[in-house]
Amino acid sequence: MHILGYFFALIIGLVMGLIGGGGSILSVPVFAYLFNIDAITATAFSLFVVGATSSVGSVSFIRQGYVNFTTAFRFGIPSVLGILFSRRLVLPHLPEYIIHRWGITLTKDMFILILFAVLMLLSAIKMIQRKERVRKPRESETNYTLLVSQGLLVGIVTGFIGAGGGFLIVPALVMLLGVSMKEAVATSLFIISINSFIGFASSLDKIPVDWAFLLSFTSLSIIGILIGVALSKRIEPRKLKPIFGWFVLVMGIWIIVTELLLK
């Protein structure tokens, strides 16, 4: 199972490099089911992996001038507040049993993994649909209240379940700010890298960290994203998204069935 887990570390980076995101959605299930790590630690480890791989992926975009730092700042600050809210105020105070009556048992770990599976399903549907995002004209007035609230929502989601939130950030930047798809993906990776590292750092006093394991896993993901970026120049990412979407959809359903019916 551990060998399979390290193989998926490579796949996580590969997918992120090929389609600009999505691979991080696999990290929490890999940590939880293949390495038998508890859900809260798994979400923290996922944040570290996502942060490292996103940082590597955003370097080339920064060099090319695609990262909009002003937008990253406006979106990123409320995101950071959302992450700190989740990691410092919500997760540590969740009871061990969310529901434990009427013959129904829902533990904290089960609750987090089920929420993560729901996010997987939403992400998968967006990948499968192939809908083009409607870009807002730059000259129209930007709804900064909506932008800040979206940033806060992304931060809460990122902090709670350890996913980067790219499938929420990219459409927000395209539809609310009118930036190009390339700029949105580049800025999203930059925001994700900062958010993820802050989320992981905020958990260091709450979880045990096996640095040798975490760094080896992350190294494989970084190798994967470098391969993915190279392959993306030859492969059309739009064609790969629906295929990966179906895979994520099946995994999300499997997690829900496993947590609710097989435990």
Image (spheres, rainbow, N blue to C red):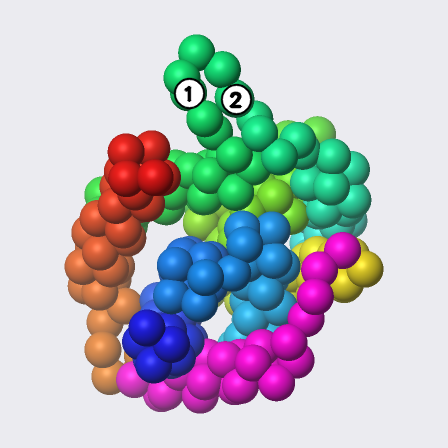
Q: Can the viewer see residue 9? A: yes
Q: Can the viewer see residue 67? A: no
| Category of crowding for the residue at label 2, using alpha-carbon neighbours closer than 10 angstroms: few (below 14), some (14–19), many (at least 20) | some
| Marker disc for residue 214 | none
Q: Residue at the spot x=50%, y=80% of the render?
A: 217
Q: Which residue is mark 2?
A: 99
Asked if 103 appears above or below 107 in the picture, the reply is above
| Residue 171 screen position, x and y as percent | 46, 45
The quarter of the rendered structure image containing the C terminus is top left
| Residue 257 screen position, x and y as percent | 27, 38
| Category of crowding for the residue at label 1, using alpha-carbon neighbours closer than 10 angstroms: few (below 14), some (14–19), many (at least 20) | few
Q: Amino acid at mark 2?
A: Ile
The quarter of the rendered structure image containing the N terminus is bottom left
| Residue 204 screen position, x and y as percent | 77, 63
Asked if 254 appears above or below 5 in the picture, the reply is above
Q: Is residue 160 left or right of residue 10?
A: right
Circles 1 and 2, Cβ within 8 Å, touching? The answer is yes
Asked if 143 appears above or below 242 in the picture, the reply is above
Question: Residue 93 lies in magenta, yes or no?
Answer: no
Q: Residue at the spot x=73%, y=41% of the render?
A: 92
Asked if 40 appears above or below 112 in the picture, the reply is below
Residue sitting nearer the eye, 37 or 163: 37
Per the model, the C-alpha gap separating discs 1 and 2 is 7 Å
**Outermost residue, top direction?**
102
Question: Residue 217 lies in magenta, yes or no?
Answer: yes
Range covered by the magenta-colored residues: 206-231
Q: Which residue is mark 1?
A: 104
Q: Amino acid at mark 1?
A: Ile
Q: Earlier in the sequence, mark 1 or mark 2?
A: 2
Q: Residue at the spot x=58%, y=77% of the render?
A: 214
Q: Residue at the spot x=34%, y=81% of the render?
A: 3
Q: Is residue 213 left or right of residue 19?
A: right
